[in-house]
Amino acid sequence: MSTSLMVSDEGPVRILTLNRPRQLNALSAELRHSIVKALNQAKDDDTVRAVMITGAGDRGFCSGQDLNESAELDASQGDEWQGGWKDYLHGFLQFPKPLVAAVNGVAAGGGFVTALLCDIRLAVPGARLIMLEINIGLPCLLGSFLLAQEMFWSRAKETVLSGREIEAGEAKRMGIVHDVVEPDELTTRGLALARQLAAKPPHAMRLNIQRFRYMRRRAMEENQVFEALEAYQGEAIASGEPQRVMAEFLAQRAARRN
């Protein structure tokens, strides 16, 4: 397993900790691959009854796609890039056990999507949830679909088109976050919740989870989400706009650090 992902067990709960704190646990291709591998292993391990996902450090749950990678994409790499993200999404959509997200900081873009792919979400008061794709020149396709499933279309559109930050308290009022927990209690509360789910009759739990996953996959198929990802993301990458915007962002960030 890669050092970018820490895997540990607490009884029947497997804990996946995104371990790139200096990058706010950004989803590099390596980290995405490691998460999918860990989910597949947990799926086949009968001793694992629930999974909790969190981030290392106290600043970020997951800041989304690693911009150092995506800023260098060209049109010829679009299919490969999309394929990696499809594998990542399917890892969650096919996982038959409960997933708890312990959001310990910023969850942006793909990090916000990762939290939405989990069944129950806890967040610290300082957590910020952002669908930031519009800010880096990309259409927000999967995120908009998942948000629309979780709340009203009007809220989903406003969140996606503005790219604004949603603080934990507002996220709870929206129903995106199920509870707001103090930082020193987040791991304990997340584990307690995951253990509670793990203690339920496993066959009934698996059937419930599989049904929820099926309904989400079916809705994605009916709305042609994956086809839209290929077409719209490919068009965006071919335009060069995301690469330009991300390069400008990285240059500004480097200037601030110097």
Image: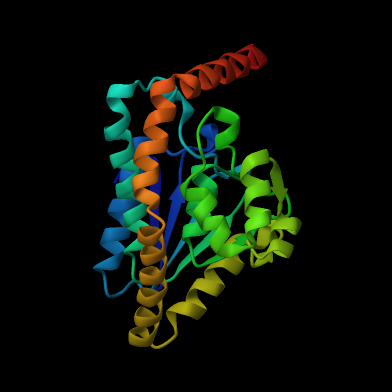
Q: Position of residue 7 (x, y in %)?
A: 38, 54
Q: Position of residue 37 (x, y in %)?
A: 28, 52
Q: Please give the name of the residue rendered at 35% of the width and 70% of the height, measured from the top-left corner.
A: 214
Q: Position of residue 107 (x, y in %)?
A: 58, 46
Q: Is residue 258 left or right of residue 232?
A: right
Q: Please give the name of the residue rendered at 42% of the width and 66% of the height, measured from the top-left corner.
A: 216
Quadrant in the picture for residue 239: top left
Q: Is residue 258 left or right of residue 30?
A: right
Total marks placed: 0
Q: Quadrant of the C terminus?
A: top right
Between 44 and 165, the residue placed more toward the observer is 165
Q: Position of residue 27 (x, y in %)?
A: 43, 39
- Tell me: residue 129, above or below residue 218: above
Q: Is residue 127 left or right of residue 226?
A: right
Q: Please give the name of the residue rendered at 34% of the width and 65% of the height, measured from the top-left corner.
A: 95
Mark yes or no: residue 55 visible: no
Quadrant in the picture for residue 218: bottom left
Between 211 and 104, the residue placed more toward the observer is 211
Q: Please give the name of the residue rendered at 49% of the width and 44% of the height, measured from the top-left corner.
A: 110
Mark yes or no: residue 188 visible: yes
Identify the colour scheme used: rainbow
